[in-house]
Structures are given as structure tokens and as C-alpha cells.
Image (cartoon, rainbow, N blue to C red):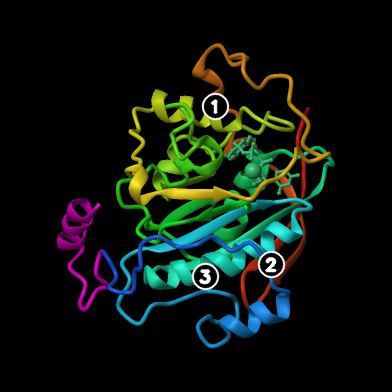
Amino acid sequence: YEESCGRFLKDIQILDSCPCLSNKLVGRRKALVVPRNWSDIEIAFKGTLQTNGEFRPHCNKWQTIAIIIPFMKREMHLRLFIDHIHPILQAQQIHYRIFVIEQNQPNIFNKGTLMNSGYLEAKKHFQFDCVIFHDVDMLSEDDRNIYNCIDSPRHIGSHVDIFQYRLFYDKLVGGALAFEIKEFENINGYSTKFFGWGGEDDDMYNRLFYKGLKITRYDEQFSKFRMIQHNRDAQNPNNIYKFNSFYPNPSHYNTDGLSSTYYKVVSVKEGPLFTSIKLNLEVAQ
Ligand code: UD2
Ligand code: MN
């Protein structure tokens, strides 16, 4: 990371830029287990965040990061996640803003379309170079796993406790994944066809592979995550396509993704900890 970041910094020549590795990092971080209520969390971070939940480090930051959280009926996880992630990102001196993208309709969760929609909507509210799609139940246990787009596409959520901190399978790109915006648009985002649990991440791996984009992962010792224990959500049943390659050829990548993502905004709320955007997805079954 330090090498690539050093090269990156040399190219962009900005004055008093933030260092690649902030001196505020502590390494291993204990994942929170007890969620505080929203007012306590807001008080805890008052003064460090802009009124729209954005964080600007004092040093000159060379990348802006949008963190997109696909969300539906996981309120407790969201309280834990928000309380947990802000101190880590601020220690990393990241210039970031968090967008919680809530699916209002339809009542079967469609993560791919939700993430695409969140990306398109966040662009209207925040100028960013790097986007990180992040599960609400994934808590980083090491602040050396830097949330930016150095060496992207980067699979940030690579070593999770529920898989004994091993990479569950080498095509795994779920949990937390970072793209420079040109990379994400080059692969036309996520497939919109996966209703319910599973598959959208495997399809994403195939898109990256097909486009020759190499996925970077950090070594397990720097990239541990805890996933908050949970059962399958009622609104997220197994989808029927998940493991067979129902897309036998990559021709759908250009027609199924950002280019076929339609949604209606129900509400946008710029809160002190994050911006929440509620959407009705318009997805053809
Ligand atoms: C794995 C992947 C996840 C995704 C999923 C298959 C990892 C670490 N995670 O997670 O990225 O590929 O398999 O779809 O590899 N969500 C809601 N409400 C719901 C359902 C889902 O908010 O009702 C959101 C939430 O951010 C959640 C994420 O979608 O964390 C993934 O869903 P999951 O946690 O049920 O899936 P899981 O843990 O099997
Ligand atoms: Mn999960």
C-alpha cells in the first residue's frame, strides 16, 4: 500500500498533502458490540463532522471517498456501524461522506440495483473520486485497512471472522469493495437482475475479470473484519439464479447495470452522521 500510495502522491504533487499512512492509526480495533442510541452517537461526533456528515481532514486530501451502504430494515446494525466507522476513517485522515441507501420498494431486496442507484444519487450530492460499497454489518477490526482507492479495485472486506478470517473463496468480492469511479463505470456497475440473496457479488467478480481489472486485497493481518451475527432477512430470500451462470456470456455486462438502473427518490435527509436516501427501485423481474 505504502509503495503504491507513495507513487500516487508523487504524481499528483499537492501541497501539504495528508500522508499515505496517518500517524493516528492504532492498528487492531475492537468491534463495538453494544449500539448506542442516535443522540449519543451524534453528540460523540459533533464538531468533527460537517452538518451533512462529511469529514474533511486538516491536511490536504488527495482523494474524496463516498461510502455507500445498501440498507433495508437493519436499524440496529446501522447504529453499530456508524458508531464504529467514523473514528476509524477519521484516524485514517480520509476525506469521506457516508450515504445510507434505503430500499423502500420493491419488498424483495435487490442489492445490485440499490448500490447502483445509491452511486448515481450520491454523485448529485458529493464530488468523489472513489466509491466504497460497504455492508452495514461489517465492522473493520484494523484501521490499517485504509478506506480509499489506492490499488483499486480493492476488496477491503476480505478476511471476515465468520469465515475464520480466511478468504472464503478467491472470487469473493462481497462485504466492502472500493472502485475509482472510472473503474466502476467501465464495468457498468452491478447487475440489476439479482433479487434476494446472493449472486450479485459473484457477477461483479466476473465483470472485473472479463474487463481485466485486477482485484487487490490486503494481507489478513491488516484486514480483519467482524460481521455482526444475523439470520437471513425475510425480505432477502435466496434468489434462484445465485450460483448457476445464468449469464452464460458477458454480453449482458453492457446492458445490465448502471445503464439499466432506474429508481425514484422517496426522500433525502442530510443528517449529522450520514446522508440517508430512500428509494423506490424500478426493477424489471
Ligand atoms: C454476503 C456478502 C454480501 C453480499 C451477500 C449476498 C460478504 C462479507 N458479504 O453477505 O456483500 O454479497 O453475501 O447478497 O461477503 N441488507 C439489508 N437488508 C436486508 C438484506 C441485506 O440492509 O434485508 C444489506 C446489508 O448492508 C447487508 C448486505 O445487504 O449487510 C448483505 O446482505 P447480508 O448481510 O444478508 O448477506 P451476507 O452476510 O450473506
Ligand atoms: Mn451479513
Determine the residue positioned at 58% across, 28% down: 255
Query: Closest to the observer: 194 or 76?
Result: 76
For this orientation, the residue located farthest to the bottom is 47
The numbered mark, 1 or 2, whose residue comes first in the sequence reads 2
Query: In the shown orientation, is residue 111 left or right of residue 225?
Result: right
Query: In the shown orientation, is residue 275 left or right of residue 143?
Result: right
What is the C-alpha distance between the residues marked 3 and 1?
30 Å
Query: In the shown orientation, is residue 12 left or right of residue 269?
Result: left
Query: In the shown orientation, is residue 228 left or right of residue 21?
Result: right
Q: According to the image, label 3 marks what residue?
A: 86
Residue range corresponding to the magenta coloring: 1-20
Determine the residue positioned at 60% across, 45% down: 116
Using the rendered view, name the quadrant where residue 257 is placed: top right
Determine the residue positioned at 40% across, 60% down: 28
What is the C-alpha distance between the residues marked 3 and 2?
14 Å
Q: According to the image, label 2 marks what residue?
A: 35
- Mark 3 sits near ligand 1, with its Cβ under 8 Å away: no
Residue contact between numbered discs 3 and 2, judged by CB atoms under 8 Å: no
Q: Secondary structure at mark 1?
A: helix
Decide whether residue 10 is among the magenta residues: yes
Ligand 2 image position (quadrant): top right
Q: Amino acid at mark 2?
A: Pro
Q: Return the mark for residue 203.
A: 1
Where residue 259 appears, as percent x and y from the top left, is: 59, 37
Query: Closest to the observer: 125 or 231?
Result: 231
Residue contact between numbered discs 1 and 2, judged by CB atoms under 8 Å: no
Q: Amino acid at mark 3?
A: His
Decide whether residue 243 is among the magenta residues: no
